[in-house]
Image (cartoon, rainbow, N blue to C red):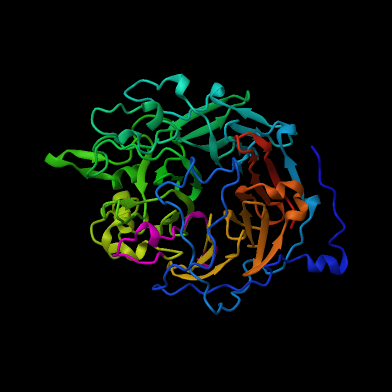
Amino acid sequence: MRRLERGKWWVGVLGLLLLMSCHGGEQLQAPPSTDDGIGDEDEPPPPEQPGDPPPVGGEVPDSGTPVDPPPPPDAGLPDGGPVGDGTPIPPDSASWRFWGPEEGGPREVLGVTQDEGGNLWVAGGEDGLCLLRPDATRLRCYTMADGLKPWAPWKGKDPAPEARYLKVLSVTGGPAGTVFVGYEGRANCESEFYKAPGVFEDPAIFKSGDADRVELQADGTLRVVHYDIHSPAHSVPGYGHREKLCTVNRIIWDKARDSLWFASNHGLAWGEPDYQGGEACSNPEVVAANEWVYAGGEKRQRCKFGVMEHVHPAIAMGDSTTSEDSRLAGDVWGVAVRPDGDVWLGTHIRTTRFKIMTNAVGHEGTGAPWNFEAARKQSEEKKHVANRIDLWPDAVAEPQFPTHAQRKDDLVSELVLMPDGTLWVSSFAWGLAKLNDAGMVTGYLLEGEGDRNITSLERDPRDGSLWIGHRWGKGLRRMHREGEFVVHNPALGGRAALPVWDIQAVGSGDGRKVLVAFSAQRDAAGAIVRPGAIGVYSGK
Protein backbone atom coordinates (compact mmCIF):
# COMPACT_ATOMS: atom_id res chain seq x y z
CA MET A 1 0.00 0.00 0.00
CA ARG A 2 1.37 3.39 -0.97
CA ARG A 3 0.93 5.97 1.75
CA LEU A 4 0.73 9.66 0.93
CA GLU A 5 3.57 11.57 2.48
CA ARG A 6 2.80 14.46 4.79
CA GLY A 7 3.08 17.62 2.70
CA LYS A 8 4.61 20.90 3.80
CA TRP A 9 2.40 23.12 1.64
CA TRP A 10 0.20 24.20 4.54
CA VAL A 11 3.02 25.60 6.68
CA GLY A 12 2.72 29.29 7.50
CA VAL A 13 0.71 31.81 5.56
CA LEU A 14 0.32 29.58 2.52
CA GLY A 15 -1.39 27.02 4.68
CA LEU A 16 -3.84 29.62 5.96
CA LEU A 17 -4.74 30.58 2.42
CA LEU A 18 -5.39 26.99 1.47
CA LEU A 19 -7.71 26.30 4.39
CA MET A 20 -10.75 27.41 2.41
CA SER A 21 -11.82 26.34 -1.04
CA CYS A 22 -12.54 28.81 -3.80
CA HIS A 23 -16.09 28.88 -2.38
CA GLY A 24 -14.89 29.37 1.16
CA GLY A 25 -16.97 32.49 1.69
CA GLU A 26 -20.12 31.32 -0.04
CA GLN A 27 -23.33 32.69 1.45
CA LEU A 28 -26.39 30.63 2.17
CA GLN A 29 -28.73 31.51 -0.70
CA ALA A 30 -32.38 32.20 -0.02
CA PRO A 31 -34.87 29.80 -1.61
CA PRO A 32 -36.59 31.08 -4.76
CA SER A 33 -40.20 32.19 -4.57
CA THR A 34 -42.70 29.48 -5.32
CA ASP A 35 -43.84 31.13 -8.56
CA ASP A 36 -40.40 31.27 -10.17
CA GLY A 37 -40.25 29.85 -13.66
CA ILE A 38 -37.55 27.66 -15.08
CA GLY A 39 -34.56 29.77 -15.90
CA ASP A 40 -32.06 29.20 -18.68
CA GLU A 41 -28.89 30.71 -17.30
CA ASP A 42 -27.24 27.56 -15.91
CA GLU A 43 -26.31 24.45 -17.81
CA PRO A 44 -27.53 21.00 -16.69
CA PRO A 45 -25.10 18.69 -14.91
CA PRO A 46 -22.13 17.54 -16.99
CA PRO A 47 -22.58 14.28 -18.87
CA GLU A 48 -21.80 11.00 -17.16
CA GLN A 49 -18.18 9.96 -17.20
CA PRO A 50 -17.74 6.70 -19.08
CA GLY A 51 -18.42 3.95 -16.61
CA ASP A 52 -19.41 6.31 -13.80
CA PRO A 53 -22.97 5.05 -13.37
CA PRO A 54 -25.93 7.25 -12.53
CA PRO A 55 -27.61 6.48 -9.23
CA VAL A 56 -29.27 3.23 -10.37
CA GLY A 57 -28.88 1.10 -13.46
CA GLY A 58 -28.22 2.95 -16.68
CA GLU A 59 -30.57 5.89 -16.27
CA VAL A 60 -32.38 7.99 -13.71
CA PRO A 61 -35.63 6.06 -13.15
CA ASP A 62 -38.97 7.84 -12.81
CA SER A 63 -37.46 11.26 -13.26
CA GLY A 64 -36.24 12.06 -16.74
CA THR A 65 -33.57 14.58 -17.58
CA PRO A 66 -33.34 17.49 -15.12
CA VAL A 67 -34.17 20.84 -16.65
CA ASP A 68 -32.09 23.96 -16.18
CA PRO A 69 -32.26 25.47 -12.68
CA PRO A 70 -33.85 28.85 -11.99
CA PRO A 71 -31.57 31.90 -11.79
CA PRO A 72 -30.12 32.44 -8.31
CA PRO A 73 -31.80 34.98 -6.07
CA ASP A 74 -30.28 38.44 -5.82
CA ALA A 75 -29.58 38.35 -2.10
CA GLY A 76 -28.34 35.65 0.22
CA LEU A 77 -29.20 34.94 3.79
CA PRO A 78 -26.86 35.92 6.60
CA ASP A 79 -24.30 33.40 7.78
CA GLY A 80 -26.07 30.71 9.75
CA GLY A 81 -23.26 30.23 12.23
CA PRO A 82 -21.20 27.16 12.94
CA VAL A 83 -22.21 23.71 11.79
CA GLY A 84 -19.87 22.27 14.43
CA ASP A 85 -17.59 24.36 16.59
CA GLY A 86 -16.66 26.46 13.55
CA THR A 87 -12.94 25.73 13.73
CA PRO A 88 -11.57 24.74 10.30
CA ILE A 89 -9.24 21.74 10.21
CA PRO A 90 -6.64 21.67 7.40
CA PRO A 91 -6.22 18.55 5.26
CA ASP A 92 -3.60 16.20 6.67
CA SER A 93 -2.39 13.19 4.71
CA ALA A 94 -0.96 11.58 7.86
CA SER A 95 -4.50 11.25 9.23
CA TRP A 96 -5.63 9.08 6.32
CA ARG A 97 -5.14 5.41 5.58
CA PHE A 98 -6.20 3.80 2.32
CA TRP A 99 -6.89 0.27 1.14
CA GLY A 100 -7.27 -0.79 -2.48
CA PRO A 101 -6.96 -3.87 -4.69
CA GLU A 102 -3.30 -4.23 -3.64
CA GLU A 103 -4.54 -4.98 -0.11
CA GLY A 104 -7.22 -7.40 -1.28
CA GLY A 105 -9.93 -4.76 -1.66
CA PRO A 106 -12.48 -4.56 -4.47
CA ARG A 107 -11.85 -2.70 -7.69
CA GLU A 108 -14.90 -0.52 -7.06
CA VAL A 109 -15.97 0.82 -3.65
CA LEU A 110 -19.63 1.85 -3.40
CA GLY A 111 -20.06 1.81 0.37
CA VAL A 112 -18.08 1.33 3.57
CA THR A 113 -19.19 0.75 7.15
CA GLN A 114 -18.14 -0.76 10.48
CA ASP A 115 -20.03 -3.08 12.79
CA GLU A 116 -20.01 -2.80 16.58
CA GLY A 117 -17.20 -5.34 16.78
CA GLY A 118 -14.85 -3.15 14.74
CA ASN A 119 -15.07 -5.13 11.49
CA LEU A 120 -14.87 -2.94 8.40
CA TRP A 121 -17.29 -3.99 5.63
CA VAL A 122 -17.15 -2.77 2.03
CA ALA A 123 -19.75 -2.74 -0.74
CA GLY A 124 -17.52 -3.86 -3.59
CA GLY A 125 -19.96 -3.87 -6.49
CA GLU A 126 -19.48 -6.94 -8.66
CA ASP A 127 -16.51 -8.00 -6.52
CA GLY A 128 -18.94 -8.66 -3.68
CA LEU A 129 -18.89 -7.92 0.04
CA CYS A 130 -15.40 -7.33 1.44
CA LEU A 131 -14.20 -7.52 5.04
CA LEU A 132 -11.27 -6.01 6.91
CA ARG A 133 -11.04 -7.41 10.43
CA PRO A 134 -9.62 -5.31 13.27
CA ASP A 135 -5.81 -5.15 13.05
CA ALA A 136 -5.80 -6.99 9.71
CA THR A 137 -3.75 -5.67 6.81
CA ARG A 138 -5.64 -7.35 3.97
CA LEU A 139 -9.30 -7.61 3.03
CA ARG A 140 -11.25 -10.72 2.14
CA CYS A 141 -14.07 -10.50 -0.42
CA TYR A 142 -17.16 -12.74 -0.35
CA THR A 143 -19.40 -13.57 -3.31
CA MET A 144 -22.40 -15.78 -4.06
CA ALA A 145 -20.10 -18.78 -3.72
CA ASP A 146 -19.74 -17.82 -0.04
CA GLY A 147 -23.46 -17.54 0.54
CA LEU A 148 -24.45 -14.01 -0.53
CA LYS A 149 -27.97 -14.15 -1.90
CA PRO A 150 -29.03 -11.32 -4.23
CA TRP A 151 -32.21 -13.15 -5.23
CA ALA A 152 -35.25 -14.82 -3.67
CA PRO A 153 -37.24 -17.93 -4.60
CA TRP A 154 -40.50 -17.71 -6.50
CA LYS A 155 -43.28 -20.22 -5.78
CA GLY A 156 -40.84 -22.40 -3.89
CA LYS A 157 -38.21 -22.51 -6.62
CA ASP A 158 -34.99 -20.56 -7.07
CA PRO A 159 -34.52 -18.62 -10.31
CA ALA A 160 -32.11 -20.06 -12.85
CA PRO A 161 -28.56 -19.96 -11.38
CA GLU A 162 -27.11 -18.76 -14.68
CA ALA A 163 -29.33 -15.65 -14.46
CA ARG A 164 -28.17 -14.56 -11.01
CA TYR A 165 -26.38 -11.25 -10.74
CA LEU A 166 -24.23 -9.91 -7.91
CA LYS A 167 -23.59 -6.23 -7.33
CA VAL A 168 -23.24 -5.04 -3.74
CA LEU A 169 -24.35 -1.40 -3.57
CA SER A 170 -24.71 -0.57 0.11
CA VAL A 171 -23.62 -1.69 3.58
CA THR A 172 -24.51 -0.70 7.12
CA GLY A 173 -22.86 -2.13 10.21
CA GLY A 174 -24.98 -3.76 12.90
CA PRO A 175 -24.15 -5.66 16.10
CA ALA A 176 -20.67 -7.15 16.37
CA GLY A 177 -20.02 -9.40 13.40
CA THR A 178 -23.23 -8.37 11.60
CA VAL A 179 -23.66 -6.24 8.49
CA PHE A 180 -26.72 -5.39 6.42
CA VAL A 181 -26.06 -5.60 2.69
CA GLY A 182 -28.01 -4.00 -0.18
CA TYR A 183 -27.91 -5.25 -3.77
CA GLU A 184 -28.64 -3.93 -7.21
CA GLY A 185 -31.46 -5.75 -8.97
CA ARG A 186 -31.22 -6.78 -12.58
CA ALA A 187 -32.28 -4.35 -15.31
CA ASN A 188 -36.05 -3.67 -15.35
CA CYS A 189 -36.59 -5.50 -12.06
CA GLU A 190 -39.07 -2.82 -10.96
CA SER A 191 -41.45 -3.39 -13.89
CA GLU A 192 -40.85 -7.05 -14.81
CA PHE A 193 -43.71 -8.33 -12.64
CA TYR A 194 -46.23 -5.99 -14.28
CA LYS A 195 -46.20 -7.08 -17.92
CA ALA A 196 -49.32 -7.45 -20.02
CA PRO A 197 -51.39 -10.60 -19.41
CA GLY A 198 -49.91 -13.59 -21.17
CA VAL A 199 -46.39 -12.13 -21.38
CA PHE A 200 -43.75 -14.09 -19.47
CA GLU A 201 -42.63 -12.42 -16.25
CA ASP A 202 -39.13 -13.62 -15.39
CA PRO A 203 -38.63 -14.31 -11.65
CA ALA A 204 -34.87 -14.20 -12.19
CA ILE A 205 -35.44 -10.48 -12.82
CA PHE A 206 -38.25 -9.41 -10.46
CA LYS A 207 -36.82 -11.53 -7.61
CA SER A 208 -33.28 -10.20 -8.05
CA GLY A 209 -31.54 -7.74 -5.72
CA ASP A 210 -32.99 -6.71 -2.32
CA ALA A 211 -30.86 -7.22 0.83
CA ASP A 212 -29.15 -9.67 3.20
CA ARG A 213 -28.46 -9.89 6.90
CA VAL A 214 -24.91 -11.24 7.08
CA GLU A 215 -23.26 -12.64 10.22
CA LEU A 216 -19.55 -13.42 10.36
CA GLN A 217 -18.87 -16.83 11.89
CA ALA A 218 -15.85 -17.76 14.03
CA ASP A 219 -14.30 -19.74 11.17
CA GLY A 220 -14.56 -16.82 8.73
CA THR A 221 -17.61 -18.14 6.89
CA LEU A 222 -20.90 -16.24 6.60
CA ARG A 223 -24.42 -16.92 7.82
CA VAL A 224 -26.80 -15.18 5.44
CA VAL A 225 -30.51 -14.42 5.82
CA HIS A 226 -32.20 -12.77 2.84
CA TYR A 227 -34.72 -9.91 2.97
CA ASP A 228 -37.20 -10.55 0.15
CA ILE A 229 -38.63 -7.02 -0.09
CA HIS A 230 -42.13 -7.57 -1.45
CA SER A 231 -45.74 -7.81 -0.30
CA PRO A 232 -47.70 -11.06 -0.74
CA ALA A 233 -51.21 -10.84 -2.14
CA HIS A 234 -53.66 -8.95 0.09
CA SER A 235 -51.11 -8.13 2.77
CA VAL A 236 -51.39 -4.45 1.75
CA PRO A 237 -54.89 -2.94 1.66
CA GLY A 238 -56.07 -2.59 -1.92
CA TYR A 239 -53.22 -4.52 -3.54
CA GLY A 240 -52.49 -7.99 -4.78
CA HIS A 241 -48.99 -9.43 -4.86
CA ARG A 242 -46.45 -6.61 -5.19
CA GLU A 243 -42.88 -6.73 -6.50
CA LYS A 244 -41.52 -3.20 -6.98
CA LEU A 245 -38.44 -2.68 -4.78
CA CYS A 246 -35.29 -4.53 -5.83
CA THR A 247 -32.29 -2.16 -5.75
CA VAL A 248 -31.21 -1.02 -2.27
CA ASN A 249 -29.24 2.22 -2.48
CA ARG A 250 -28.66 2.81 1.24
CA ILE A 251 -29.55 1.11 4.52
CA ILE A 252 -30.08 2.81 7.88
CA TRP A 253 -30.03 0.86 11.16
CA ASP A 254 -32.09 2.55 13.88
CA LYS A 255 -30.83 0.59 16.85
CA ALA A 256 -32.96 2.51 19.36
CA ARG A 257 -36.20 1.36 17.70
CA ASP A 258 -34.97 -2.00 16.40
CA SER A 259 -35.55 -0.96 12.80
CA LEU A 260 -33.92 -1.06 9.40
CA TRP A 261 -34.76 1.33 6.58
CA PHE A 262 -34.10 0.26 3.01
CA ALA A 263 -33.72 3.25 0.67
CA SER A 264 -34.59 1.64 -2.63
CA ASN A 265 -35.67 2.20 -6.17
CA HIS A 266 -39.25 3.46 -6.18
CA GLY A 267 -39.68 3.74 -2.40
CA LEU A 268 -38.67 3.14 1.22
CA ALA A 269 -39.16 -0.15 3.08
CA TRP A 270 -38.88 -1.13 6.75
CA GLY A 271 -37.12 -4.26 7.99
CA GLU A 272 -36.49 -6.24 11.18
CA PRO A 273 -32.78 -6.12 12.09
CA ASP A 274 -32.87 -9.53 13.80
CA TYR A 275 -34.88 -11.28 11.08
CA GLN A 276 -34.01 -14.99 10.93
CA GLY A 277 -36.19 -16.08 8.02
CA GLY A 278 -39.78 -17.21 7.63
CA GLU A 279 -43.02 -15.40 6.87
CA ALA A 280 -43.98 -14.03 10.29
CA CYS A 281 -42.56 -10.83 11.74
CA SER A 282 -41.36 -11.09 15.33
CA ASN A 283 -41.90 -7.62 16.85
CA PRO A 284 -45.28 -7.87 18.63
CA GLU A 285 -45.84 -4.11 18.65
CA VAL A 286 -45.25 -3.89 14.90
CA VAL A 287 -47.46 -6.90 14.23
CA ALA A 288 -50.30 -5.51 16.35
CA ALA A 289 -50.18 -2.09 14.67
CA ASN A 290 -50.23 -3.53 11.16
CA GLU A 291 -53.03 -6.04 11.39
CA TRP A 292 -56.12 -5.12 9.38
CA VAL A 293 -59.45 -6.65 8.46
CA TYR A 294 -60.01 -7.92 4.92
CA ALA A 295 -63.39 -8.30 3.24
CA GLY A 296 -65.59 -10.73 5.17
CA GLY A 297 -63.82 -10.06 8.45
CA GLU A 298 -60.65 -12.02 7.71
CA LYS A 299 -57.61 -10.60 9.50
CA ARG A 300 -54.60 -9.71 7.38
CA GLN A 301 -51.05 -8.69 8.25
CA ARG A 302 -48.90 -6.14 6.43
CA CYS A 303 -45.61 -7.15 8.04
CA LYS A 304 -44.43 -10.27 6.21
CA PHE A 305 -41.02 -11.89 5.73
CA GLY A 306 -39.40 -9.34 8.05
CA VAL A 307 -40.36 -6.30 5.95
CA MET A 308 -43.05 -3.72 5.24
CA GLU A 309 -43.06 -1.88 1.95
CA HIS A 310 -43.34 0.80 0.61
CA VAL A 311 -43.77 4.57 0.86
CA HIS A 312 -42.85 7.35 -1.57
CA PRO A 313 -43.90 11.01 -1.83
CA ALA A 314 -45.06 10.54 -5.41
CA ILE A 315 -46.72 13.20 -7.53
CA ALA A 316 -48.85 13.09 -10.64
CA MET A 317 -47.46 14.36 -13.90
CA GLY A 318 -48.98 15.48 -17.15
CA ASP A 319 -47.68 15.95 -20.67
CA SER A 320 -48.76 15.20 -24.20
CA THR A 321 -47.63 11.58 -24.03
CA THR A 322 -48.50 10.61 -20.48
CA SER A 323 -51.80 10.32 -18.66
CA GLU A 324 -52.29 12.86 -15.91
CA ASP A 325 -52.90 9.91 -13.64
CA SER A 326 -49.27 8.82 -14.03
CA ARG A 327 -47.30 8.97 -10.81
CA LEU A 328 -43.71 10.01 -10.44
CA ALA A 329 -42.06 8.29 -7.49
CA GLY A 330 -38.31 8.29 -8.03
CA ASP A 331 -35.59 6.40 -6.21
CA VAL A 332 -34.95 6.91 -2.49
CA TRP A 333 -31.35 7.77 -1.61
CA GLY A 334 -31.63 10.01 1.44
CA VAL A 335 -32.89 8.70 4.82
CA ALA A 336 -32.54 10.28 8.27
CA VAL A 337 -34.24 9.12 11.47
CA ARG A 338 -35.61 11.88 13.67
CA PRO A 339 -35.38 11.79 17.49
CA ASP A 340 -39.11 11.02 17.64
CA GLY A 341 -38.63 8.00 15.35
CA ASP A 342 -40.22 9.51 12.24
CA VAL A 343 -38.11 9.29 9.11
CA TRP A 344 -37.09 11.95 6.63
CA LEU A 345 -36.76 10.44 3.17
CA GLY A 346 -35.63 12.13 -0.01
CA THR A 347 -36.24 10.88 -3.53
CA HIS A 348 -35.53 12.04 -7.06
CA ILE A 349 -38.88 13.85 -7.00
CA ARG A 350 -39.88 14.98 -3.48
CA THR A 351 -38.88 14.80 0.20
CA THR A 352 -41.26 13.83 2.99
CA ARG A 353 -41.49 13.15 6.71
CA PHE A 354 -42.71 9.57 7.01
CA LYS A 355 -44.71 9.71 10.25
CA ILE A 356 -44.29 6.08 11.25
CA MET A 357 -44.18 6.96 14.97
CA THR A 358 -46.36 10.10 15.15
CA ASN A 359 -49.09 9.50 12.56
CA ALA A 360 -51.84 9.60 15.20
CA VAL A 361 -51.01 13.21 16.11
CA GLY A 362 -54.03 15.20 14.94
CA HIS A 363 -55.67 12.10 13.46
CA GLU A 364 -58.14 9.62 14.91
CA GLY A 365 -57.99 5.82 14.90
CA THR A 366 -54.65 5.41 13.16
CA GLY A 367 -53.01 3.09 15.67
CA ALA A 368 -49.74 4.96 15.95
CA PRO A 369 -46.94 4.20 16.45
CA TRP A 370 -45.81 1.71 13.79
CA ASN A 371 -48.94 1.88 11.64
CA PHE A 372 -47.27 1.81 8.22
CA GLU A 373 -50.44 2.38 6.20
CA ALA A 374 -51.57 5.40 8.21
CA ALA A 375 -48.12 6.93 7.92
CA ARG A 376 -47.96 6.18 4.19
CA LYS A 377 -51.22 8.02 3.60
CA GLN A 378 -49.85 11.12 5.32
CA SER A 379 -47.04 11.26 2.77
CA GLU A 380 -48.95 10.17 -0.32
CA GLU A 381 -52.59 11.25 -0.17
CA LYS A 382 -53.56 14.30 -2.21
CA LYS A 383 -54.67 16.31 0.83
CA HIS A 384 -51.20 16.01 2.43
CA VAL A 385 -49.49 18.08 -0.24
CA ALA A 386 -47.59 20.04 2.43
CA ASN A 387 -45.71 16.82 3.30
CA ARG A 388 -44.34 16.48 -0.24
CA ILE A 389 -41.52 18.99 -0.27
CA ASP A 390 -40.21 20.21 -3.62
CA LEU A 391 -36.69 21.29 -2.66
CA TRP A 392 -35.68 22.68 -6.04
CA PRO A 393 -39.11 23.79 -7.26
CA ASP A 394 -40.73 22.77 -10.51
CA ALA A 395 -42.25 25.48 -12.67
CA VAL A 396 -45.68 24.56 -11.31
CA ALA A 397 -46.77 23.25 -7.93
CA GLU A 398 -49.43 20.80 -6.82
CA PRO A 399 -52.31 20.52 -7.56
CA GLN A 400 -51.05 21.30 -11.07
CA PHE A 401 -49.34 18.44 -12.89
CA PRO A 402 -45.85 19.30 -14.18
CA THR A 403 -45.02 18.40 -17.73
CA HIS A 404 -41.59 17.05 -18.52
CA ALA A 405 -40.45 20.54 -19.52
CA GLN A 406 -41.78 22.03 -16.28
CA ARG A 407 -39.99 19.61 -13.98
CA LYS A 408 -36.79 20.23 -12.08
CA ASP A 409 -36.25 16.91 -10.38
CA ASP A 410 -34.59 17.17 -6.97
CA LEU A 411 -32.39 14.09 -7.47
CA VAL A 412 -31.71 13.80 -3.73
CA SER A 413 -28.54 11.86 -2.94
CA GLU A 414 -28.32 12.00 0.87
CA LEU A 415 -29.84 13.51 4.03
CA VAL A 416 -28.13 14.48 7.28
CA LEU A 417 -30.05 15.50 10.40
CA MET A 418 -28.36 17.90 12.83
CA PRO A 419 -28.98 17.98 16.61
CA ASP A 420 -31.01 21.22 16.36
CA GLY A 421 -33.41 19.64 13.86
CA THR A 422 -31.81 21.20 10.79
CA LEU A 423 -31.86 18.87 7.80
CA TRP A 424 -29.15 19.11 5.14
CA VAL A 425 -30.14 17.60 1.80
CA SER A 426 -27.71 16.97 -1.04
CA SER A 427 -28.53 16.50 -4.70
CA PHE A 428 -26.79 14.64 -7.48
CA ALA A 429 -27.42 17.75 -9.59
CA TRP A 430 -28.22 20.90 -7.59
CA GLY A 431 -26.00 21.21 -4.49
CA LEU A 432 -27.14 21.52 -0.87
CA ALA A 433 -30.51 22.56 0.54
CA LYS A 434 -31.09 23.44 4.19
CA LEU A 435 -34.43 22.68 5.86
CA ASN A 436 -35.67 23.57 9.30
CA ASP A 437 -37.37 21.10 11.61
CA ALA A 438 -40.76 21.89 10.07
CA GLY A 439 -39.51 20.96 6.60
CA MET A 440 -39.27 24.50 5.23
CA VAL A 441 -36.37 25.22 2.87
CA THR A 442 -34.33 28.07 4.33
CA GLY A 443 -31.46 28.28 1.84
CA TYR A 444 -29.04 26.72 -0.61
CA LEU A 445 -25.28 26.20 -0.87
CA LEU A 446 -22.83 24.82 -3.44
CA GLU A 447 -24.87 25.77 -6.49
CA GLY A 448 -21.86 26.37 -8.76
CA GLU A 449 -20.89 24.24 -11.72
CA GLY A 450 -19.27 20.99 -10.54
CA ASP A 451 -19.75 21.90 -6.87
CA ARG A 452 -23.43 21.02 -7.08
CA ASN A 453 -22.94 17.36 -8.06
CA ILE A 454 -22.96 15.83 -4.56
CA THR A 455 -23.11 12.10 -3.93
CA SER A 456 -22.77 11.75 -0.14
CA LEU A 457 -23.00 13.58 3.20
CA GLU A 458 -22.14 12.72 6.79
CA ARG A 459 -22.16 14.60 10.07
CA ASP A 460 -18.89 14.26 11.98
CA PRO A 461 -19.73 13.22 15.57
CA ARG A 462 -16.42 14.63 16.79
CA ASP A 463 -17.22 18.30 16.13
CA GLY A 464 -20.54 18.43 14.26
CA SER A 465 -18.99 19.45 10.95
CA LEU A 466 -20.42 18.21 7.65
CA TRP A 467 -18.43 16.00 5.25
CA ILE A 468 -19.44 16.37 1.60
CA GLY A 469 -18.53 13.94 -1.18
CA HIS A 470 -18.63 14.87 -4.87
CA ARG A 471 -18.32 13.26 -8.25
CA TRP A 472 -16.56 14.43 -11.42
CA GLY A 473 -13.28 15.30 -9.76
CA LYS A 474 -14.43 17.60 -6.97
CA GLY A 475 -13.45 15.06 -4.33
CA LEU A 476 -14.11 15.62 -0.64
CA ARG A 477 -14.71 18.72 1.43
CA ARG A 478 -15.79 19.57 4.95
CA MET A 479 -18.04 22.41 6.15
CA HIS A 480 -17.25 23.77 9.61
CA ARG A 481 -19.36 26.91 9.25
CA GLU A 482 -22.20 27.47 6.81
CA GLY A 483 -20.71 28.50 3.49
CA GLU A 484 -17.09 27.91 4.60
CA PHE A 485 -15.40 24.77 3.30
CA VAL A 486 -12.09 23.01 3.69
CA VAL A 487 -11.19 20.92 0.65
CA HIS A 488 -9.39 17.69 1.59
CA ASN A 489 -8.24 16.77 -1.90
CA PRO A 490 -4.58 17.60 -1.30
CA ALA A 491 -4.45 14.70 1.17
CA LEU A 492 -6.17 12.27 -1.21
CA GLY A 493 -3.80 12.28 -4.17
CA GLY A 494 -5.34 10.83 -7.33
CA ARG A 495 -8.27 9.49 -5.35
CA ALA A 496 -9.73 13.01 -5.34
CA ALA A 497 -10.73 12.41 -8.97
CA LEU A 498 -12.94 9.45 -8.02
CA PRO A 499 -16.64 9.76 -7.13
CA VAL A 500 -17.23 9.67 -3.36
CA TRP A 501 -20.23 7.37 -3.20
CA ASP A 502 -20.57 6.92 0.58
CA ILE A 503 -19.34 8.50 3.82
CA GLN A 504 -20.01 7.00 7.25
CA ALA A 505 -18.67 8.03 10.66
CA VAL A 506 -18.20 5.58 13.52
CA GLY A 507 -17.32 6.17 17.15
CA SER A 508 -17.19 9.47 19.00
CA GLY A 509 -14.74 11.97 20.42
CA ASP A 510 -11.09 11.62 19.52
CA GLY A 511 -11.63 7.94 18.70
CA ARG A 512 -14.13 8.48 15.91
CA LYS A 513 -13.28 7.48 12.34
CA VAL A 514 -14.66 8.76 9.05
CA LEU A 515 -15.03 6.03 6.41
CA VAL A 516 -15.05 7.09 2.77
CA ALA A 517 -15.92 5.05 -0.32
CA PHE A 518 -13.97 6.17 -3.39
CA SER A 519 -15.58 4.57 -6.43
CA ALA A 520 -13.80 3.65 -9.68
CA GLN A 521 -13.38 5.24 -13.11
CA ARG A 522 -14.14 3.28 -16.26
CA ASP A 523 -13.43 3.82 -19.92
CA ALA A 524 -16.03 4.03 -22.69
CA ALA A 525 -16.13 0.24 -22.93
CA GLY A 526 -16.88 -0.10 -19.21
CA ALA A 527 -13.46 -1.35 -18.16
CA ILE A 528 -12.06 0.01 -14.89
CA VAL A 529 -9.10 2.26 -15.66
CA ARG A 530 -8.65 3.66 -12.15
CA PRO A 531 -9.70 1.38 -9.27
CA GLY A 532 -11.48 2.65 -6.22
CA ALA A 533 -10.28 2.76 -2.62
CA ILE A 534 -11.41 2.68 0.99
CA GLY A 535 -10.34 5.73 2.96
CA VAL A 536 -10.28 5.95 6.76
CA TYR A 537 -9.75 9.36 8.34
CA SER A 538 -8.79 9.47 12.03
CA GLY A 539 -7.63 13.09 12.36
CA LYS A 540 -9.34 15.99 14.04
Indicate left or right for 414 with 188 as reference. Answer: right
Q: Is residue 422 visible?
A: no
For the record, the magenta segment spans 394-423
Residue 421 in magenta?
yes
| Image x and y of residue 40, in percent | 49, 67
| Image x and y of residue 226, in percent | 45, 31
Indicate left or right for 267 with 471 as reference. Answer: left
Residue at (74%, 62%) from the top-left corner? 89
Q: Quadrant of residue 368?
A: bottom left
Residue at (55%, 79%) from the top-left corner? 75
In the picture, the quarter occupied by the C terminus is: bottom right
283 or 167: nearer the viewer: 167
Indicate left or right for 521 with 276 as reference. Answer: right
On screen, residue 347 above or below 73:
above
Residue at (47%, 30%) from the top-left corner? 150
Residue at (35%, 67%) from the top-left corner? 396
| Image x and y of residue 256, in percent | 48, 50
Q: Quadrant of residue 479?
A: bottom right
SS assignment for the magenta stretch, majority:
loop
On screen, residue 64 above or below 398:
above
In the picture, the quarter occupied by the N terminus is: top right
Residue 425 in magenta?
no
| Image x and y of residue 519, in percent | 63, 43
506 or 285: nearer the viewer: 506
Residue that extends furthest to the left in the rendered view of this protein: 296
54 or 282: nearer the viewer: 54
Q: Is residue 17 visible?
A: yes
